[in-house]
Amino acid sequence: MSKEPLRIPQILELYEKYLDVQDPVAFMRQVTENYAQGTLQRLAVHGVREVRRAAVLAMGLLGDYECNHTLGRALLDEDRTVRTLADNALRAVWTRAGTVKDQQELGVIVRLSAAQQYAEAIRRASKLLARAPWFAEAWHQRGVAQFALGHYGEAIRDCHETLEINPYQFVAAATMGQAYLELKNPVSALECFRRALRLNPDLEGVRAQVVRLARMVEDR
């Protein structure tokens, strides 16, 4: 008996139109009119890769932190485009936890770090975490600023806390690895880099670190 053909959802048509005209605003409006976030999560494991691409793209543009698990699993998709879209989408939804006020404050912290105002970024991140200790990305951004100032132990602790809350935060795992390298601890660095790579197999720079450190540890 032949298998019943997969039903192709409307989002595929919306996605193809988006690829043709490159209008993300229209794509977001049309997706919002037709799909709830839960439906997008289900479509992210659809049998047709283009449907998965469309769903993951939509979650990156529209989704909130509730999509984190689905997008984290999409990092392991057999289709490279799905994986790339999931990487981008995760980095977006990680900033969308909490209240609007929390999200705005996180944006300020990110901009402070980009301007190399790391001490002020740490101060504001600490203040944000005092009222929102469950906000994983606030821990991570404080860890990033700590790393930039050479506070490697503090960076490791903040990134560890990030991963306790958000086990898909591959950037935090890689940052921990870099911090352990600075502390001359290649064994712990290798463990962290391997964790990052398990979460996101397309981190080629991390993969190179794993190969290099594995040889170093074996030669000891």
Image (tube, helix red, strand yellow):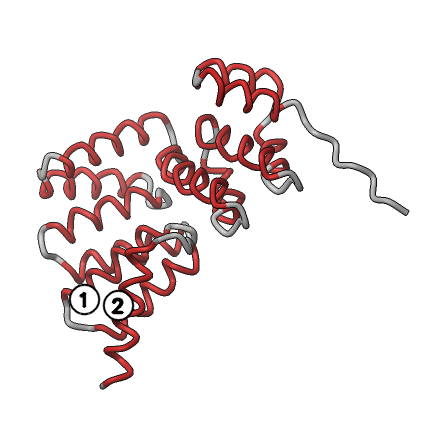
Question: How far from the left and from the top, in percent, is residue 34?
Answer: 62, 19
Residue at which label 1 appears: 181
Q: Residue 27, image x and y in percent?
A: 50, 18
**Quadrant including the C terminus:** bottom left
Q: Quadrant of residue 156?
A: bottom left
Q: Which residue is drawn at the image coordinates 42% and 51% (left, top)?
A: 168
The answer to whether mark 1 and mark 2 are in CB contact below 8 A is yes
Q: Is residue 47 rendered to the left or right of residue 95?
A: right
Q: Label 2 sits on what residue type?
A: Ala
Q: Earlier in the sequence, mark 1 or mark 2?
A: 1
Label disc, if present, on residue 189 of the rendered structure: 2
* Nearer to me, 35 or 165: 35
Whole-percent x, y for residue 99 in the image: 38, 29
Q: Quadrant of residue 46?
A: top right
- Disc 1 secondary structure class: helix
Q: How many marks?
A: 2
Instruction: Report, in whole angstroms, how far the alpha carbon at label 1 lies from the one at label 2.
Output: 6 Å
Label 2, residues with CA under 10 Å away: few <14, some 14-19, many ≥20? many
Q: Amino acid at mark 1?
A: Leu
Element at badge 2? Answer: helix
In the foreground, 22 or 64? 22
Tell me the residue at 31%/50% (across/down).
171
Report the front residue among 71 and 20: 20
Within 10 Å of the Cα at label 1, are there few (<14), some (14-19), or many (20+) other Cα atoms? some
For residue 102, the mark is none
* Residue drawn at the location 61% of the way across and 24% of the way down: 11
- Measuring 70% from the left and 29% from the top, which residue is drawn there? 8
Q: Specify the farthest residue to the right.
A: 1
**Measured along the vertical axis of the image, is residue 214 above or below residue 84?**
below
Q: Is residue 53 above or below residue 25?
A: below
Q: Position of residue 134 (x, y in %)?
A: 37, 45
Find residue 180 and report its image quarter: bottom left
